[in-house]
Image (spheres, helix red, strand yellow):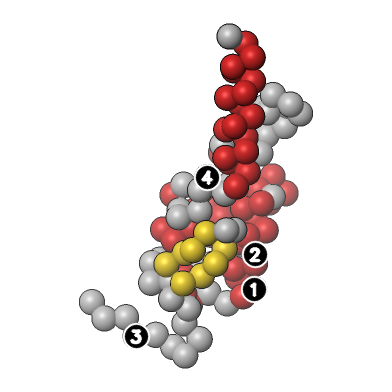
Amino acid sequence: MALVANDDFQYIIRCMNTNIEGREKVMYALTKIRGVGRRFANMVCKKADVDMSKRAGELSAQELENLVVIINNPLQFKIPDWFLNRKKDHKDGKNSQVTANNLDQKLREDLERLKKIR
């Protein structure tokens, strides 16, 4: 399968401290970001009104910015609480979607908390 790319096609996209392959479909390309799965990526694409048949390299800067905003603030875009990967955080009791470097930080905090229990 040959990919015919425009002049503005990006083969590698840097998004949320992750290199995203531009030749993949948008939904599957978003799953390369740690903390974003296929179902959450599908929901984010629908909320951002991004065409699911597009390749990630074909996204405009505005579309990519919309996707990042929705991933960072899913509750503001009416994504349900049960869809998020961090429910009732031990420190603040809030529901959130933890991605990229924050995922490592939260894991480290949880392990330290569990070590104190023992």
Label 2: element kind: helix
Q: Which marked residue is nearer to the observer: mark 1 or mark 4?
A: 4
**What number is the disc on residue 4?**
3
Question: Can see residue 62?
Answer: yes
The kind of secondary structure element at disc 1 is helix
Mark 4 — residue?
35
**Residue type, mark 2 in image:** Asn
Measured as percent of width and height from the top left, residue 32 is found at: 45, 55
Residue type at the position of mark 3: Val
Q: Are marks 1 and 4 in contact (CB under 8 Å)?
A: no
Above or below residue 92? Residue 54 is: below
Question: Dot 2 corresponds to which residue?
Answer: 66
Total tally of numbered discs in the picture: 4
Q: Count neighbours of disc 1 (C-alpha within 10 A) and say few if under 14, some if 14 to 19, many if 20 or more.
A: few
Name the front one of labels 2 and 4.
Answer: 4
The three-letter amino acid code for the residue at tag 1 is Gln
Residue 103's place in the image compared with 87, above or below, is: below
For marks 2 and 4, the one nearer the N-term is 4
Q: CA distance from mark 4 to mark 3?
A: 31 Å
Quarter residue 24 falls in:
bottom left
Q: Which mark is residue 62?
A: 1
Q: CA distance from mark 2 to mark 1?
A: 6 Å
- Which residue is drawn at the image coordinates 51% and 70% (left, top)? 13
Whichever of labels 2 and 3 marks the residue nearer the N terminus, that label is 3
Q: Where residue 69 sits: x, y (%)?
A: 67, 58
Element under disc 4: loop
Mark 2 and mark 1 residues within 8 Å of each other at the beta carbon: yes
Instruction: Decide which of tag 4 and tag 3 comes sooner along the chain.
Output: 3
- At a point 57% along the width and 24% down the height, the residue shown is 111
| Label 3 CA crowd tier, 10 Å (few <14, some 14–19, many 20+) | few
The residues bearing labels 3 and 1 have C-alpha atoms spaced at a distance of 22 Å
